[in-house]
């Protein structure tokens, strides 16, 4: 609620959906609407869009019904936030099976404390995106990415049967590597936002803080084990300039980094391909995506082709 | 054979083994030795080491037996060149089985032309190192690395069953990605050297030239297929600044790059670990390798430990 | 041809000229126009531009004459593609004289095979641009750049008469350094596009593949010569991070790189200066161009001036 | 204790001082010496240095007195480790006065918990170096650097009296920014070594883990305060590529980073100048240090001079 | 004044204010307005904005009064150029007091020649901005920044009382470090522009040229002193890649660089914070600024907060 | 002259030649030798080399004749400093002819003031090296490089006859671009050293200071001309990160940079080739140089060859 210089009350609003944000002004039913709207309410609005001070502004119609509050079944949530196409529950089930493979009792206790017993965490984990853009930037993206990294890391490890590699650390490191993201991102109507703590600490640091706290609750949790797991989380970005506070120095950390790195790239290819084919499928037979600035290239979205110019 | 200012003939020699190179001078039996020695001869020498013009020089003893030519069973080839500890033949057999998995007839014909029918190539391929240093820098290293990349690339691919990925291209690209290295390196007594063509063109370019030539021999080999395979070879280093003339733009190229990248790093960890444990096993209980300049770090060579300072 | 949900047929079109691309919809004469239009047809259109789904869309007028197909003399090709201001035939003649200077018979045969006997290549070569942007990004730009590099490389070489430099390699390397660009770019109505093979292999690789194939047709073409020429093509970008698969390691490669580099920069200055003076000549007396992102600077477009602020 | 192939027992030793490390072999009194020596014992040794397997090796004399164990007053500890020239107790007193300036009760409690109540920490903190090289790489260097950063940060802050800056956070952040270094480095006879946990986690991460644990012990310690302090520790290196997991995003973090950065550089100048003047004072009147690779330059070690060539 | 193809005279104008530039055309009173307007005249205009050739163009109304020339009191200069909020005269007085602290007679003479006796310089210095953007990009910004750097450099120096640092050089270097900016920027109605000499030489070079010329006017000005001062000016950006022709090699140069660097960053925080709070204060309770591309981050614009998500 | 703790006088000396520096001590004839030796005296010495405090030290023999002062014809100056193989006088004559080509009277006056009238400068210019290493690092190297750059720049310019390029600025810029090097380097017995002013200002800055001073002596020298010439000097390194305070923004500056860049690279090839062939010509038939760290590659030192491995 604001007041003009000549004393007239009006209401400033901010409307958001996946296409962006627009400022709205209600000159007519400011008090009424101030009361019934809170942040996060989904509405239908009527009014006129004007250019005000170099930005678009919606002047809301002079009608009590200009703003209609919508109930959950009256709007498509996908207008506000993208959601994974996969079955999140099934992914979660598969992820729990990975924990069953762990033989070290302390590592198993730690993973169960996180992924089974901390129900509040599990709810956030199943909803969370893995990024604001680039890849897995949608509701459910985090658990999808996490399971893929666990499976990929295990596959990589299995290619080196003669090497002295700790399987339990591979599973634990891969499962836990991005848990800090449940605190780094929050879902808002206009998409995915970085939280205040995400800005201040980042998901890697919050990840090890979380693990530290879970481990404290487990009696006699070995300090050396905790250090190995924290090292995997800290180093999973691989290089300092890619945001890793520490480079991978154990074989397990190197493998989890390799898996994370490969899945990130493959996911980008998958998502760019899908988007290109979806956009174009009715009238363009294009082999190539648009230029993607994260990959700094176009990618080929179709398989082997019979002809090349 | 040289002649001093006062007309005396003498013989300049260069001795090499894995520890380095030393110049030798034979003032006494120059002609005799000039005749019986050629580049690559393995000898035992007696003489005195002197400092000459800031370098070490071996003044050979005045005796016809000062230089003894050794036969193959009189010296340990490992003094001159490191050799893989694996069974190269077994690796080769396993590699051939990978070719059997290919369904596209043209790709299969191409792979057989290279890895089965070109016997001269196969000999070089089984002997070749994969680098002059860094990783797999030993006789047999190339085929060892190649098979590991094929298997790893297949594993990675298998983690994405829903994606439209060409399995045959994965196998072919991984098998062929480094074949140019058979021409880039040569084994000399003092170790591994880059050849003239290796300096001028590099293994990536020689790799696609080789594939071009093999494909020309196969009637109607589809140009589009050839381009896909060449693209994988060209892009397997991943980024321009890592030496890839082109970045991976197909999902198959991205996967082969991921596999190559992961195997290179894992092999470095394996080789540094082995070397550290071998060097230290009698008297140091060290958890850490020395600083490695390729990885720009020390790596941890022992598993989880009960205590940390 | 598409069909709406209620079964109505309509035609989706894409219009392009140098200013960009616009989607068009013909709701009225879809079938008629579907028949008479193909990709590359130049037309005049009437209709209304609407904002549809965040993009501009041209709704074509309900009239059989809304779309008029234009014949070659009814439109100005420069609306669709920029063309060199030079006489391409004259450049070609001058280029042929360069080949006459070559003394080595194999190099001469190679150059004639490319630039004289392969008529299909010559046609492409005379039409081709040298880039999609930056410099020489216009029809005829490739041959213009090529001749300038040959002449410049020869001038540089002539400044070092005492050095052991192979003049024939300088000429051959400079002439051939960018021939792969005839396959990397294609002219489309909206400007210059990178081809599929250009994306997959790039002009440097396609250049050496072309030279390999021409050389194969010449009996006994010396392998060492081919390697020298290929090395010049591969290294002409100078540094790995500027896109050269190999750095210049021969004096001839270094000189061709220097000439290519200097001509690229000088051409950018020339083209920015021309554009700035053309844009401004009626009402601004400006000494400076706008900021140019490729050069990361403004450039001074006028000569020495009497006053400075 | 080792045994030769022919059953002879011998003792392998490693000798260290500030000049380096040397392997020693005792063929004569292996058992005797094995008993009386442990890691860290300071000794005087007699023997002969031989070149063995490309490394220097000390063959210990055949005498029971070849190795004399020295008591604390028989050797100069500075031969083994460099020590600050400042009075560490006085620095500590001054540092405690900084804590008195803090007004926020929680921040004060936190700082007292660390710097007053945790006596074990205080002991380590007073001994610890601030680096293995570069600057403050000596016993006592950490506390010296810490106090300098606190004072400098306060000075910088005082230059901006009109800005909304939290003085308590400046003091706390500067005091705590490097406390992780007490766990990152350990003093060994041959100098300063990075610990296992230092390799695995690094001082920045261990710093916030320590702060997390201290804060947990303080009832109702505000989470927002903890985040501000942790953010300062995490970001004090300033940029990702300089090893900061997060860039400074609060004005307090920016100021602590500026102070840390300035003190590091000034300390390098001070230490290089001292070393240069010490080394040269008897016979060279040099104005310039040797090339320093950390600063990538020579520095001028004398003040304004009357003449320049 | 231009003439259309059919001979009609018209006037092309360029209008500028802080929001940008727009082309205008006067078809009606071209001659009249051509006479009474010169570059820099502030006017009020009436007309219609049209899209012409992809740019906005103002077609001026057909009325002799369409363009009204405004006198100084009829418009707000802040619409055209931002001005410091501080009292420039007071800053100047404080700056003169800094000169009084200098003890070396030559340095004092130099500083007085610049900041007291050269009145023309002083006028420019008090008006000049310190940048076109980033920080202190407003009229008066240069002197504000200069005084802050002098005071900050003195504070830093005072933290190292035991070091051999020349106080006079600190003051002189800090006062003079950016004087070249009086020639690098000029104030135009649309904001701050780089001058021709600014483009050709830059403020660092012009700074030392100015100092050279002032020093020449002082009899017997010591060459060594001049070199120390010039070195501080040349090196104040700190690193070659940040635009310093030379890295700081004297302790005084290092301190002035540290002060300049810290003040630049702190000023950015201050200006971003102010702008964010000003923009948002009526209706958004935001803790974070927008993404800032110079700092490559968002910054936190509010102090410690009780809650974090 | 030093005195030992027990009062004995001794003389510390530093011996230098191209191979390095060694400390010498004369215990026997300290006073005698202190008198007759000054810095720069060339001597023959007898004595014993001992290891003292980790460095080599020459203990001079107890004999009055242990140190013999050599006259100019008794030693080979090349033992102390490398000298160009070219005729410096002839280069100078050719350079003067370049000045004759200049048509602008002010530019001509400036060049004559520098290269003809300032005899002291000419002497330094003919002796000066162009670097301490990398290329032209020998007495006479500067003038050799300068003439080559002038000629090369003219050649490049002549390839663009249609462009508006100022020939006089090309000649002046190329002639003057490195004159600051006469003050940056000095010849000492052990080779080439950077002077104090070279460290503090660098040759680029000293170059424009010199030009500023010469221009001041010429009545009415146009400021705009001076700025163009200074811009060429300032920008001749081409990019900020290569040490240019300003990037080239005029076509003349771009051409001088291109010429300087090309000549530097070609000179490196020439010098590496010569050195490789000289070192190896008696007993190695090598096609490749050793790895060169400035070019980061080996270079091919022989022409086209018939065979490649």
Image (tube, coloured by chain):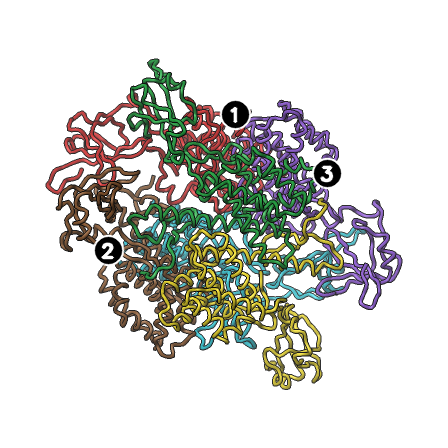
Chain colours: A brown, B cyan, C red, D yellow, E green, F purple
Say which quadrant the C terminus of chain A sits in.
top left
Crowding near the residue tagged with mark 1, few <14, some 14–19, many ≥20 C-alpha atoms within 10 Å: few
The Cα atoms of the two marked residues, 1 and 3, are separated by 35 Å
Q: Nearer the viewer, mark 1 or mark 3?
A: 3
The Cα atoms of the two marked residues, 1 and 2, are separated by 60 Å
| Element class at badge 2 | loop
The residue that mark 1 highlights is F164
Crowding near the residue tagged with mark 3, few <14, some 14–19, many ≥20 C-alpha atoms within 10 Å: some
Q: Which mark is residue A83?
A: 2
- Residue F72 vertical position relative to residue F229 in the rendered view, above or below: below
Residue E31 x, y percent position in the rendering: 37, 16
Residue D97 x, y percent position in the rendering: 52, 67
| Element class at badge 3 | helix
The residue that mark 3 highlights is F124
| Element class at badge 1 | loop
- Residue F218 vertical position relative to residue D161 in the rendered view, above or below: above
Q: Looking at the picture, tell me which residue is in the foreground, C87 or E176.
A: E176
Residue F146 x, y percent position in the rendering: 65, 35
**Drawn side of residue F93 relative to residue C220, left or right:** right
Kindly indicate whether the residue at mark 2 contacts the one at mark 1 (C-beta within 8 angstroms).
no
- Residue B242 vertical position relative to residue D182 in the rendered view, above or below: above
Image mark 3: chain: F
**Drawn side of residue D184 relative to residue F178, left or right:** left
């Amino acid at each position: 609620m604001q007041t003009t210089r000549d004393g007239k009350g009006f209401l400033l609003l901010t409307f958001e959906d996946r296409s962006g944000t627009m400022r709205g002004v209600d000159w007519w039913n400011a008090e009424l609407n101030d009361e019934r709207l809170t942040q996060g309410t989904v509405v239908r609005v009527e009014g006129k869009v004007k250019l005000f001070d170099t930005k678009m502004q919606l002047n809301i119609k002079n009608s009590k019904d200009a703003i209609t509050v919508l109930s959950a079944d009256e709007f498509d949530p996908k207008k506000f936030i993208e959601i994974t196409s996969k079955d999140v529950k099934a992914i979660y089930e598969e992820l729990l099976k990975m924990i069953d493979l762990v033989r070290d009792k302390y590592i198993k206790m730690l993973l169960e404390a996180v992924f089974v017993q901390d129900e509040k965490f599990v709810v956030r984990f199943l909803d969370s995106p893995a990024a604001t853009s680039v890849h897995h930037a949608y509701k459910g993206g985090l658990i999808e990415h996490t399971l893929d990294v666990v499976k990929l890391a295990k596959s990589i490890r299995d290619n080196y049967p003669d090497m002295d590699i700790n399987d339990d650390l591979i599973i634990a490191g891969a499962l836990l590597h991005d848990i800090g993201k449940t605190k780094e991102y929050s879902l808002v109507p206009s998409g995915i936002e970085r939280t205040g703590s995400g800005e201040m600490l980042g998901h890697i640091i919050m990840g090890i803080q979380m693990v530290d706290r879970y481990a404290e609750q487990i009696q006699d949790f070995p300090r050396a084990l905790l250090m190995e797991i924290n090292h995997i989380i800290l180093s999973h970005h691989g290089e300092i300039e890619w945001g890793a506070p520490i480079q991978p120095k154990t074989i397990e950390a190197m493998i989890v980094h390799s898996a994370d790195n490969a899945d990130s790239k493959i996911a980008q290819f998958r998502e760019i391909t899908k988007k290109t084919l979806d956009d174009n499928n009715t009238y363009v037979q294009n082999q190539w995506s648009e230029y993607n600035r994260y990959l700094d290239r176009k990618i080929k979205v179709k398989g082997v082709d019979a002809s090349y110019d």
